[in-house]
Image (tube, rainbow, N blue to C red):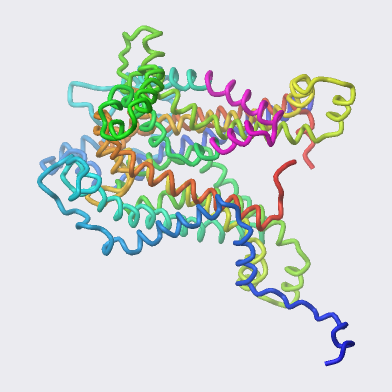
């Protein structure tokens, strides 16, 4: 068998095993619930009968192994069980709660990736080409700083920037400045597009309207993830540029851009792809905070609300979706880096 | 004294640790100095919070969302508590909890990592595979799930984050430990009949310390940001304890009126993480002797 195919199959198998163990962990979340949980959920006035009914509903009365396979079997069919928010006669399935929100989150994540990945690659390549120039230094300092900012700081800074578009001229600070300075700052602020600071989205929002309203969350996430991707691209390409075959290309008289694109980049794909996948995986964590800041109705916000109300089935479903996406992204990165770099097939 | 005595080269005395640190500090770049000063400032505020703060941590005044004034330098929050006081106490709570978590995660991670590196075999296999699985779930998501089960309290917060974070410490400790555990002096100590405890603490640990210290800084940042994010989401540190993450959320509505008060705690978080990153960057440079890629 072709060694590339074999390694890829091995990775796939490993990914499946990981996914299997992760489902066990997430499943045991419900088994680890403290004994008085039913009482806490149902309130002090709960009768022993309702408590027993609730425990039967979440299935604590059956053996764990049986429950696990029943649970996985349902999930494979797209049934995540019913939320603890269900009442008698009014069943709310987890699937129906999650579906529209999952679409919104995917929308945000894809939109961010479409902006962030080309931007990071472009900036990284430029910084590598003109390394140690002022451009490189500025980009480096800015990215090192944004890496260490929490998402909500970036998010509120952006929101503040957009709000001060209207309020700046009225502030005491603006009035203490000379008039021409205040006016010109105001002019610059007015160049900022008036993105909505709250992302009100329903399932009837038209596509471009959706893009417009998701712009600010998307820009926040882009700022958070671009830094890391760009730095890794830069380092990967600089490492490649130090190899003898690049000198050869240079001596042939190729232009710097052509050297990077034709010679350095193909060999640098493996580390770059890994970092891109890692950051897209990071995106699904950042999404949680950013969705809460901009009240974007996505799966992250849903998960946080479910954690607060301790609605364990919803939390489990969200955790499973996040974890599966994460594993899948890392797996894809592994496979792409194997496929693009045959040297990885022969580890020392 | 004769002139011949002068000709004999006096062996230069080995510099003491203090003098080596001094020379290293002298050569430190501006960013590192900035970082050190800021971190010391935070530690100072955190330790002396009750003496610096103008009011009590949970003292409530009549006016909620009061504007900046002489009395309340940066205004009051949604319940009428002085924001400056909450910021100062927040330094104590947020940094204290993050520091405790990082210490715990290092105690667990380094011990297990070095043990795995020393014994290898089945112990290493079991621990490494367990860590692989734990790391295959994003830690914020894992933390959210565990918090929904055990409820949000400071103890469960510290334990959960420390456990999740120790996986990364474990990986690093194991990797650097593996390099050291095969050295001749470790073998010599084994032949000399030293016990595993001696070998771990006296032979291996001192030689893996620099990368671990740098990692401590980075891990601290990460833990600090995770706790801040969880508190911001309302599932971390619970009121009435003052902490920066929840302060941002509680005052967030002010931003729509063009008031920058909610940016202050967020900025405090950002400034601390940036400073720690600067110091770690410099420390890595100074201890590894690495230079930037040229």
- Quadrant of image for the N terminus of chain B: bottom right
Residue A106 image position (x, y, % from top left): 44, 20
Q: Which residue is drawn at 86% across and 24% down?
A: A249
Give the quadrant of residue A343: top right
Vertical comparison of A88 with B122: above or below: above
Q: Decide whether residue A131 is among the magenta residues.
A: yes
Vertical comparison of B257 with B130: above or below: above
Front one among B283 and B143: B283
Vertical comparison of A33 with B104: above or below: above
Residue A282 image position (x, y, % from top left): 50, 33
Taking the image as shown, residue B251 lies to the left or right of residue A141, namely left
Q: Give the range drawn in magenta.
A: A114-142
Residue A160 image position (x, y, % from top left): 34, 29
Vertical comparison of A63 with A120: above or below: below
Q: Decide whether residue A281 is among the magenta residues.
A: no
Q: Residue at x 86, y 30 (%)?
A: A247
Give the quadrant of residue A287: top left
Q: Residue at x 39, y 23 (%)?
A: A184
Classified by dominant secondary structure, the portion drawn in magenta counts as helix
Front one among B185 and B259: B259
Q: Which residue is drawn at 55% across and 47% down?
A: B130
Outermost residue on the bottom side: it is B1
Residue B80 image position (x, y, % from top left): 16, 45
- Quadrant of image for the C terminus of chain B: top right
Front one among B167 and B24: B24
Taking the image as shown, residue A133 lies to the left or right of residue B239, namely right
């Amino acid at each position: 068998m072709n060694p590339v195919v074999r390694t890829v199959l091995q990775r796939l198998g490993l990914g499946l095993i990981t996914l299997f163990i992760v489902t066990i962990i997430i499943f045991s979340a419900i088994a680890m619930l403290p004994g008085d949980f039913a009482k806490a959920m149902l309130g002090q006035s709960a009768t022993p009968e309702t408590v027993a009914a609730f425990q039967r509903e979440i299935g604590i009365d059956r053996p764990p192994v049986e429950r696990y396979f029943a649970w996985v079997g349902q999930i494979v069919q797209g049934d995540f069980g019913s939320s603890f928010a269900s009442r008698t006669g009014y069943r709310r399935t987890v699937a129906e709660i999650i579906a529209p929100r999952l679409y919104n989150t995917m929308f945000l994540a894809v939109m961010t990736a479409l902006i962030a990945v080309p931007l990071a690659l472009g900036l990284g390549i430029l910084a590598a080409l003109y390394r140690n120039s002022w451009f490189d230094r500025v980009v480096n300092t800015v990215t090192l700083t944004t890496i260490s900012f929490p998402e909500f700081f970036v998010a509120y800074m952006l929101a503040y920037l957009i709000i001060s578009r209207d309020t700046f001229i009225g502030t005491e600070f603006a009035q203490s400045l000379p008039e021409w300075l205040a006016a010109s700052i105001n002019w610059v602020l007015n160049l900022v597009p008036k993105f909505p600071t709250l992302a009100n989205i329903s399932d009837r929002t038209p596509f471009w309207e959706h893009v417009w309203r998701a712009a600010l969350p998307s820009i926040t996430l882009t700022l958070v993830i671009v830094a890391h991707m760009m730095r890794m691209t830069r380092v990967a390409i600089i490492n490649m540029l130090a190899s003898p075959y690049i000198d050869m290309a240079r001596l042939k008289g190729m232009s710097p851009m052509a050297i990077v694109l034709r010679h350095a980049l193909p060999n640098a794909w493996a580390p770059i792809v890994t970092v891109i996948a890692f950051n897209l995986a990071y995106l699904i964590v950042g999404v949680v905070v950013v969705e809460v800041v901009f009240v974007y109705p996505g799966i992250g916000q849903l998960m946080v609300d479910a954690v607060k109300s301790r609605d364990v089935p919803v939390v489990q479903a969200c955790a499973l979706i996040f974890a599966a996406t994460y594993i899948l992204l890392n797996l894809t990165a592994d496979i792409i880096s194997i496929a693009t770099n045959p040297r990885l097939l022969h580890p020392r | 004294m004769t002139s011949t005595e002068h000709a004999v080269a006096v062996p230069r005395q080995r510099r003491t640790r203090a003098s080596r640190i001094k020379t290293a500090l002298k050569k430190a770049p501006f960013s590192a100095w900035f970082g050190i000063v800021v971190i010391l400032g935070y530690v100072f505020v955190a330790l002396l919070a009750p003496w610096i703060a103008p009011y009590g941590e949970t003292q409530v005044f009549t006016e909620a969302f009061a504007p900046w004034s002489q009395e309340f330098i940066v205004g009051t929050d949604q319940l009428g508590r002085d924001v400056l006081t909450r910021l100062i106490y927040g330094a104590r709570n947020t940094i204290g909890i993050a520091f405790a978590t990082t210490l715990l995660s290092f105690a667990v991670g380094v011990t297990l990592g070095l043990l795995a590196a020393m014994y290898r075999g089945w112990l290493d296999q079991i621990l490494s595979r367990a860590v692989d699985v734990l790391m295959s779930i994003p830690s914020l998501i894992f933390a959210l799930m565990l918090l929904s089960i055990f409820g949000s309290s400071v103890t469960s917060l510290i334990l959960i984050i420390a456990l999740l974070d120790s996986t990364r410490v474990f990986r690093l400790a194991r990797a650097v430990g593996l390099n050291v555990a095969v050295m001749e002096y470790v073998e010599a100590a084994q032949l000399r009949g030293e016990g595993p405890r001696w070998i771990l603490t006296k032979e291996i640990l001192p030689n893996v310390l620099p990368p671990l210290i740098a990692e401590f800084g980075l891990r601290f940042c990460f833990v600090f940001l995770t706790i801040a994010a969880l508190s911001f989401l309302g599932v971390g540190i619970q009121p009435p304890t003052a902490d920066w993450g929840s302060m941002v959320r509680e005052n967030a509505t002010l931003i729509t009126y063009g008031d920058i008060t909610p940016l202050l705690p967020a900025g405090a978080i950002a400034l601390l993480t940036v400073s720690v990153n600067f110091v770690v960057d410099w420390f890595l440079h100074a201890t590894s002797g690495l230079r930037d890629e040229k």
